[in-house]
Image: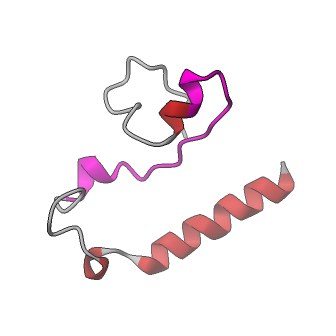
Amino acid sequence: SINAPALVPGIDLSDHWGFWQHGLPAVMVTDTAFLRNPHYHMPTDTADTLDYRRMALTVDGLYRVAVGF
C-alpha cells in the first residue's frame, strides 16, 4: 500500500479526488490498471478483458479490512 501525496502522477485519476477537494475523507483502491492494462478506458475495455476472480478477492480483502477496522 501507499499513502501518496497529490504530486504522484495519476493519484487524482479516480472518484476520490472530488471528495478530497471538499475536505472529505476518501480512499482510493487501485490496481494501477492504467499502468498495466492496455484496455483501460479504451474502446476495448470490455467485460471480457476483466479478471473477475481477482476482483472478487480484492472485494473480499477490502471487506475484511473494513469490518476489522
Report whether residue 2 is seen: no
Apparent side of residue 34 relative to residue 22 in the rendered image (left or right): left
* Residue 45 image offset from top left, x and y in percent: 22, 67
Q: Residue at x 44, y 20 (%)?
A: 6
Q: Residue at x 51, y 32 (%)?
A: 18
* Residue 50 image offset from top left, x and y in percent: 33, 74
Segment colored magenta: 19-37
Please tell me whether residue 27 is drawn above or below residue 36 in the rendered image: above
Apparent side of residue 38 relative to residue 17 in the rendered image (left or right): left
Please tell me whether residue 27 is drawn above or below residue 66 in the rendered image: above
The quarter holding residue 22 reads top right
| Scheme of image coloration | secondary structure
Report whether residue 32 is seen: yes
* Residue 66 image offset from top left, x and y in percent: 77, 54
The quarter holding residue 24 reads top right
Please tell me whether residue 2 is drawn above or below residue 53 in the rendered image: above
* Residue 42 image offset from top left, x and y in percent: 16, 59
